Amino acid sequence: ALLSIGILAFTAFTSFGQTEAIQIENPNAPQISFETEVIDYGTIDKGADGVREFKFTNTGKSPLIISNARGSCGCTVPTWPKEPIKPGETSAIKVKYDTNRPGPINKSVTITSNAKTPTKVLRIKGNITVPQTSPEKKVPAAAPVAN
């Protein structure tokens, strides 16, 4: 009886190694194709409009569902379409960066979907400068006007 328990346990352990999921690629899976995967804000002033769009097309053969879009920090806030994107349709993921933070921008947005490539990382970059304000010129007091 002890031998049969040992054989049973050994069989159970060896069968676990073979239960790894085999990824079968769905030829009809949706596919997300971005116009660009990096948006360069360039050099912009502090407080400027921080909204940009990553435009994409579903180049697959079934509806694309974006389940999540997550910024790498709280200063990068993405919004994405919640409805399925039909094959051939285009849409956009909007990203709002907090432009009240001067300095370089180098952030990422991670997209999760049911596409052939389920996780996609997009990037934003650029630089935010503080506009130089010129000191106020002192206007000399007007000289008395003679009557």
Image: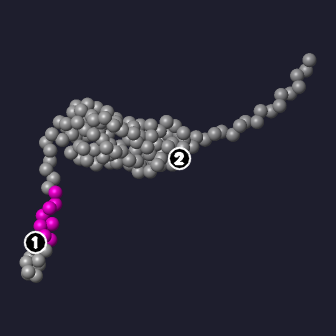
Callout 1 secondary element: helix
Instruction: Indicate the position of residue 115 as horizontal and vertical percent values.
Output: 23, 43
Q: Residue furthest right?
A: 147
Q: Amino acid at mark 2?
A: Arg
> In the current view of this chain or complex, which residue is farthest to the top?
147
Visible in this render: residue 55? no
Answer above or below: position of 20 versus 39: below
Circle 1 is placed at which residue position?
11
Does the magenta-highlighted stretch encompass residue 123? Answer: no
Residue range corresponding to the magenta coloring: 12-21
Residue 111, visible in the rendered structure: yes
Residue toward you, 82 or 57: 82
Position in image of residue 66 (x %, y %): 30, 41
> In this orientation, which residue lies closer to the viewer: 1 or 40?
1
Within 10 Å of the Cα at label 1, are there few (<14), some (14-19), or many (20+) other Cα atoms?
few
Q: Position of residue 140 (x, y in %)?
A: 80, 33
Give the Cα separation between the discs numbered 1 and 2: 60 Å
